[in-house]
Amino acid sequence: MSRGPAVAYYLSGHGFGHATRAVLVMEALHRLAPGVQLHIRSTVQESLLRKYLRLPFTLERVQLDSTVIERSIFAVDVPATAAAYRAWAPTREVTIAAETASMRSAGIDVTVFDVPPAAAAASAAAGIPSVAITNFTWDYIYDDYRAEDPVFAEAVRQCRADYALADLALQLPLGHTFDQFRRTVAVPLVARRTAVDREAIRAELGIHDSRPVLVVALRGAATGLSVDGRDVQVLSFGELDGPGVRRLEPAWDQRFSEVLAAGDVVLSKPGYGVCSECIANGKPLLHLPRTGFREADLLVRGMDGAVPHAQIDAETLADGTRLALVCRDLMQSPVPPSADVSGADACARMILEVAGLANGDLYRRG
């Protein structure tokens, strides 16, 4: 009895963007190879994946990177990040050995990772091809902390050595130059373009007046931050509060793209998921500053010429009159031509090519 290709998909547990873009790539793999077997290995919450990925998959809790530790959704705790790496590093070899055995036992055809470097080492040890998909790498992030703790020099060295074992890196927009991989191919945005009846969604949300609609996409605790929603209609995902702010019911979580389409401007911190969706849907973005997130500068620069955007401070958010003026100014900015959002399909095709499963040979194993 034939079966579809078996894909081990390793996800960093840090941030929402890794998981959301991986879902789009997995959906594209399913379109090209309907019998694909998805073996997800990550510390990402299963409830998050079940909410967005409507395909059969298995999930095993595996940690193949130590990522970064945050003081808040706006700031990195560098000493805690150093401590986390020191705690994780001694487990690296044992974890890689266990993953190598797991890949062989499951009959994995190809490994995809976004973007824990040790996944490439485990895949190479198992003799299985591997593909990285990312806009940034962990050595790039850790390199920014080297002056604060010597452990990051070792972290950078180890990350680069592991990444060099991958067969292919698929480089997403909104990132930095890759020189640590043997082969790199640039791909378009992995993002979802929404085609919905904007007015119908606005009616469902109870939006009936002409005030700007600000969609707040902050999924963590925004401590000390308040938005004045008296001159702007504010729809909030997460815990942000303030006068006139409407916290959306949990049922809307799975309809984020529809809410995005219904809104006029998005408020968030710079992250791949929200930046790419705003670009894909031509939705202006107000972004809050982040401290210690080197990726944030890449994302902000990458939006130049792709979508109207501006940085905003807490004082402006708390002043409804000023906030309304900022929103209206962004709404009047010219929106660039639609971006290419075919990245998920491009990634899926190249993953299957690397695995030797392209050209109709998608069900090689029996």
Image (tube, helix red, strand yellow):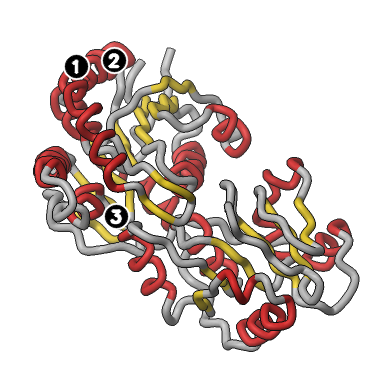
Q: Give the Cα separation between the discs numbered 2 and 3.
A: 27 Å
Reading the image, the residue beneath label 2 is 102
Q: Residues within 10 Å of mark 3 (few under 14, many from 20)?
A: many
Does residue 78 sit above or below 95 in this rendering? below
Q: Nearer the viewer, mark 2 or mark 1?
A: 1
- The kind of secondary structure element at disc 2 is helix
Does residue 336 sit above or below 81 in this rendering? below
Reading the image, the residue beneath label 3 is 136
Q: Quadrant of residue 361?
A: top left
Q: Is residue 347 visible?
A: yes
- The kind of secondary structure element at disc 1 is helix
Image position, residue 320 (x, y; %) = 73, 76
Q: Give the Cα separation between the discs numbered 2 and 1.
A: 12 Å
Of labels 2 and 3, earlier in sequence is: 2
Does residue 271 sit above or below 117 in this rendering? below
Q: Is residue 276 visible?
A: no
Q: Residues within 10 Å of mark 2 (few under 14, many from 20)?
A: some
Amino acid at pointer 2: Ser
